[in-house]
Image (tube, coloured by chain):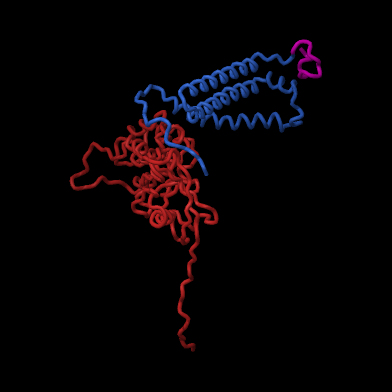
Chain colours: A red, B blue
Amino acid sequence: MSTATIDNKPIVPEEIQSFTATIIVRRFNPEVDDEPHWQDFDVQLYPSDRVLDALHKIKWEQDGSLTFRRSCAHGVCGSDAMRINGRNRLACKTLMKDLDVTKPIYVEAIKGLPLEKDLIVDMEPFFASFREVQPFLMNSVAPPKGKERIQTVAQRARFDDTTKCILCAACTSSCPVFWTDGQYFGPAAIVNAHRFIFDSRDENAAVRLDILNDKEGVWRCRTTFNCTDACPRGIQVTQAIAEVKQAIMRGKA
Amino acid sequence: MTSTIQAPRSPHTRSTKKSGVNWEKWGWIYMRVSGVVLVVLIFGHLFVNLMIGEGVSALNFAFVAGKLTNPFWMTWDIIMLWLALIHGGNGMRTLVNDYATSRMSRGILKIAILVSVVALIVLGTLVVFTFDPCPAGAPADLVASFCKSL
């Protein structure tokens, strides 16, 4: 019978090495600059750090004038969508270990919306499209007193994917059709229309289908899948747009 | 990395007029339907012309003349001609809508596309229906074998 022996060696967690990463940020100060320009920063980071942590380190330790939006910093509020190494991502959900830190990391504002300062764009055209699709429940019949509107599991699952949208604009600002003249509704507005078009409790699917059956509506989608790739919530955006096209052709959801 | 896609060139506006026929919708449906048909027509065309029998070396005036006297191939060619040219023209139109910035250049380019599509369709249709496979005085070794019996 073996006796338990005390292992004298203390358990030392493996030390995680930090490294220096180069972050190149596209800066723009409307009060000083005529044109945006790239500025690079060297930041000491851990693999578990996110791009947002790198931006914080720059802002707090190197250049307090760096301007960007972030609110919850945990991928829920959708404030910090930006273009990281040419792809639209949330800075708070992009880990340094998933990027190639041997090369500089390029960070810039999302494209296709008016640049205001550094990484901040004017989101108003984006929200204008969102408002246009009437993204709220419309039902003329009041629910039974003290009760909710009942929905089956299958009816709820029909539009589950598109309820996940956090309106970060990563999809719309990755869409080459939106870049052209900014008139296209954009993936995010169509996703949020989809959420109510396929909701069994909503009565006005036909109104939204009519709105999206526009010259600038779903027919401008070229199925490049940029939006699906950009979505930080993993929404199948292009599929949602295709389902709205099908619904318009059939004339009902 | 220095892509410079800026703010939208024109402010966000939406046309309020709703005309009866939705051309964007029917254009989109046409692209999908004609695309599927064209896959069959074009690959069938290439297979028959380039792979069956002697292959590409069989192609000459007599081969094409022989095909254009056969009602089956005349129908095949005329459908392929119309579908492909309208499909291509509509595709070019969407590209112009996406990339031409001013109303003026957009209009000019779209008219140029329309004119060339119409011209090519008219010429192609004329060839398919008025083609003479046995031109008078042509050497017998260059025309189709059935010309001798005429």
The residue lying at 48 percent from left, 30 percent from top is B98
- Location of residue B128 in the rendering, given as x and y in whole percent from the top left corner: 64, 18
Residue B142 shows up from this direction: yes
Is B30 in front, or is B18? Answer: B18
Q: Is residue A90 left or right of residue A203?
A: right
- Location of residue A171 in the rendering, given as x and y in whole percent from the top left corner: 43, 42
- Location of residue A189 in the rendering, given as x and y in whole percent from the top left corner: 37, 38
Residue B78, picture quadrant: top right
Is A242 in front, or is A99? Answer: A99
Residue A238 shows up from this direction: no
Q: Is residue A150 left or right of residue B61?
A: left
- Tell whether position A5 is magenta: no
* Up-down relation of residue B36 to residue B19 (above or below): below
- Tell whether position B146 is magenta: yes
Q: Quadrant of the C terminus of chain A?
A: top left
Q: Residue furthest left?
A: A145
* Up-down relation of residue B125 to residue A227 (above or below): above
Q: Mostly what secondary structure, the magenta segment?
A: loop
Q: Residue furthest top?
A: B136
Q: Is residue A66 left or right of residue B40?
A: left
Boundaries of the magenta span: B135-150
- Location of residue A59 in the rendering, given as x and y in whole percent from the top left corner: 39, 54
